Amino acid sequence: MIDSALFSWRFLRVWKRNLVVYKKIWKVNFLTPLFEPLFYILAFGLGFSGLIDNVKYGGADLSYTEFIAPALIATAVMWNAFFETTYASFVRMYYQKTFDGMLATPLSLEEIIIAEITWSATKSVGAATIMLIVLGLMGFIQFPLGLLLIPLAFFGGLAFGAIGMFFTGIIPTIDMFNLPIFLFITPMFLFSGTFFPVSNLPVWVQPVALAFPLYHLVELARRFSIGTSEISPIINIGYLTVFFLFFTNLALGAMRKRLIQ
Amino acid sequence: MDKIIEIQDLIKQFNGFKAVNEISFSVNRGEFFGLLGPNGAGKTTTIRMLYGFSPPTQGKLRIFGMNINTDFRKIKAKIGVCQQENTLDPDLSVEQNLHVFAGYFYIPKKEAVERTRELLDFFALSHKKDAKVMELSGGMARRLTLARSLINQPELLILDEPTTGLDPQSRHQVWEKLEELKKTGLTVVITTHYMEEASQLCDRLVIMDHGKILVDGSPKDLIDRHVGKNIIEIEGPDQALIEYVKEHAIEHDDLGRRLILYEPEGKGLNNIIREQFCNEKCTYRNSSLEDVFLHLTGRELRE
């Protein structure tokens, strides 16, 4: 089904269009990743640390704030990419007819979709980098290992951007994004080894957490910032790669069905 | 002659409904070609197939002698499209709209800047180059869309109702610009509801209805062929007139309170009506493309 003539580097022009727009508003967008980790670290570090002993994770003994700091970067990657290809892409596609305009040029629909997903991953990189600096200064990240979080943010962003784009392809109205957020993103945010190790969950629920892409991203984020994780990073990378390819394919199919009439 | 568009037995089907039903026409280089028809006639569907937005269900469609399915990039690189809906990018300024759009065509930066300057100048938008698209009036937005569709110096320009919803001043300004473009030898395909627009601009046109092409020809040709030079409209026609019309087999549309007669040439019908049948109000006028259109597509509303 995949026709290689439909894919070219021309998608970078759409990516660049999003960058041009972003440059106008980056000053506002830049504040969230700057303050978000500070709030979490303050709330959980100061507020919870008295209640919670050290966390045993992947053979290491971590303070609670050390444990959650890398997960905050992973969740930011998820939120940034997912919001971009859901709400933002939907507005461009449905309300602004931006894709319709692009389809009158030599761009293919496939390139537009790939560009949107790639752009969402780029936004994840932006947020992760700022958080990396903040958390790094606070001593929660080991360097130079922690620099790997930057390419990781791009990689994770692709996975969440792809599934977001798939929802954009099938959702009838913009308010209905509440559903995947409530049923998919929120539980994932809470149960992916972000705020407590998955090994703390009852044995029968653990496989569910392992099916969450965020779990694998959180694992990799810890591996790259504190040097340890629960399972082999090869499995995490493999899972996210398959997840990305699978949902990119579904997203392309859904968007073709939606826009090519 | 050099054919830019060749369409033969083209069909577009949506869930069993044939929006375009076996149409055939061709457009020559340098021609200004019109697609006319009431709402739902299949004009926009046809046009969307032309620029590769919508794949044909069946039939032959060649543009610049190429197949849109396999050579879509080459074809689209040489086409400019002004869509019916406003697809300007509201996140970008007027100038950026053109710059970014040029990028989609791989137009080098320097050339894009130069073209943008020329086009904004041509469409009298230079003073608005930093404005947001949302701040533009309807006429300005349409001119910007036209400017954008010319950024790649297309060989074929496709315009889907370029003047719908504009005030008369803006409409005339757009016509003026289109006239100028026509002089450069650009090939243009246009859909419109304004008969005045079609008669003024089009070298040749087709009238479509229910997915079919009813007639094609030059505006003058169509008027001569289908309604004749002159038209007489009679308010409150009496029975005697209706019988006279039937007896002499005069082409007419009977609207009940109003009778429209398409006057055959050289029969002096005009005088006969004036002397014998004009009870209330009679109008004698030259016929127009609008008469052809209404005569062929009927007068009931299309909603």
Image (spheres, coloured by chain):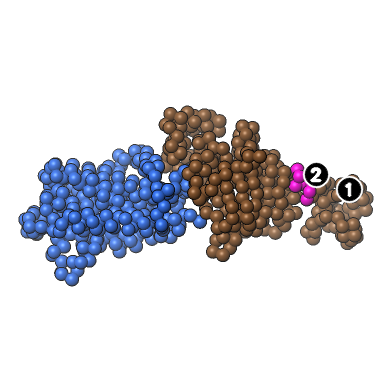
Chain colours: A blue, B brown
Residue at the far bottom: name it.
A204
User: Sequence-wise, which precedes: disc 2 or disc 1?
Assistant: 1
Q: Amino acid at mark 2?
A: Asn
Q: Which residue is pictured at 57% across the width and 47% down the height?
A: B62
User: How far apart are labels 2 and 1 at the CA level?
Assistant: 12 Å
Indicate the chain on which mark 1 is placed.
Answer: B
The residue under label 2 is B286
Q: Quick one: B273 or B95, which is closer to the camera?
A: B95
Q: Position of residue B138 (x, y in %)?
A: 55, 42
**Residue placed under numbered mark 1 in the picture:** B270
Look at the image and tell me whether residue A159 can be seen.
yes
Dot 1, how many residues are within 10 Å of its Cα: few (below 14), some (14-19), or many (20+)?
some
User: Which residue is drawn at the image coordinates 83% and 53% (left, top)?
Assistant: B261
Q: Position of residue B168 (x, y in %)?
A: 64, 40
Count residues near mark 2 (Cα–Cα under 10 Å), then give few for <14, some for 14-19, many for 20+.
Answer: few
The span shown in magenta is: B220-226
Left or right? Give the position of B24 relative to A223: right
Dominant secondary structure of the residues highlighted in magenta in the image: helix
Secondary-structure class at tag 1:
helix
Whether residue B94 is visible here, answered yes or no, is no
Split into 4 quadrants, where in the image is the N terminus of chain B? top right
In which image quadrant can residue B203 be found?
Answer: top right
Is B222 in the magenta? Answer: yes
Q: Is residue B155 magenta?
A: no
Q: Position of residue B54 (x, y in %)?
A: 52, 53
